[in-house]
Amino acid sequence: MKKLKAMLYGAYFLIACMATTPASAGSSEFTGIYVAAQGSAVGVEFDGTYTDENGLNTSGTGGRAAPIAGIELGLNIPIGKTFFVSLGGVHNHGSAKVIEADDFDNTSDVTVSLFDHRTYYIQPSISLWENSAVYVKYGWSEADLSAEGQVTPSGDISLSGHTVAIGTTSMFGSGIFIRTEVGATDYDDIKLTNIGGTGSDGGTNTVVASPKMAYGNVSIGFKF
């Protein structure tokens, strides 16, 4: 997250510098409602602490990468000759297994999957030329985490957190655009208990983790 914040500060500085130089640009090229299809590569990381039945703590990190797809809807609002703000939301469909612990005798298998990810965002942008823009994004994200196997709570767990990102938008003829973006989401902590336990001792096995997600995506859409 520190590296991403540094990238965002750099993007803000770049935008401020560009705003002071003349450019053949226009926010009117981007004004209007838009819809887009999105493909993403995401990496989910769980950085946490495992406490066993004897009270011993072990710190570790786990997770994996997966592709997901989504749909995006938003509105570009001009606030100046070259500046505009986008308000929108994106819904990523499908699920991705982020933790899969396979016990040899199948008595302690645990599978954790992330699915149904949603982000609602505000996105300040600056138009560099008539058909391109750069932006920074801040959003509120929600997702469902499914925990299955010898773990409590089992079933769906609600996650929420903050998303920050930077990206570019390129407009083509007839309202078609392509957007590229990189970003990260920092979710609230979660707690799982009874990890692999079948009795009173196993019920004290606990994991407290801080889920984080880094992603890169490409969107192809249409501005009305």
Image (cartoon, grey):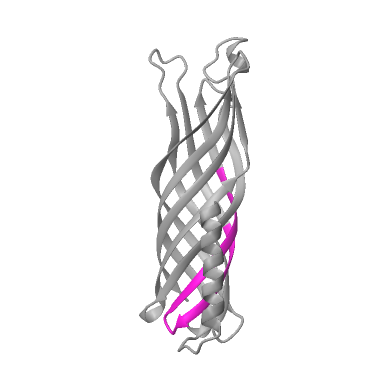
Residue 54 placement, left or right of 175: right
Is any atom of residue 30 visible in this view?
no
Q: Which stretch appears magenta? A: 120-143
Residue 200 placement, left or right of 182: right
Asked whether residue 147 is drawn in magenta, I would say: no
Residue drawn at (47%, 17%) of the image: 108
Picture quadrant where residue 58 is located: top right
Q: Position of residue 101 (x, y in %)?
A: 43, 25
Q: Position of residue 211 (x, y in %)?
A: 55, 40
Q: Position of residue 119 (x, y in %)?
A: 56, 55
Chief SS of the magenta region: strand
Residue drawn at (56%, 70%) of the image: 12
Compared with 7, 201 (above or below) is above
Picture quadrant where residue 13 is located: bottom right
Residue drawn at (53%, 79%) of the image: 17
Picture quadrant where residue 75 is located: bottom right
Asked whether residue 122 is drawn in magenta, I would say: yes
Residue closer to the observer: 64 or 3: 3
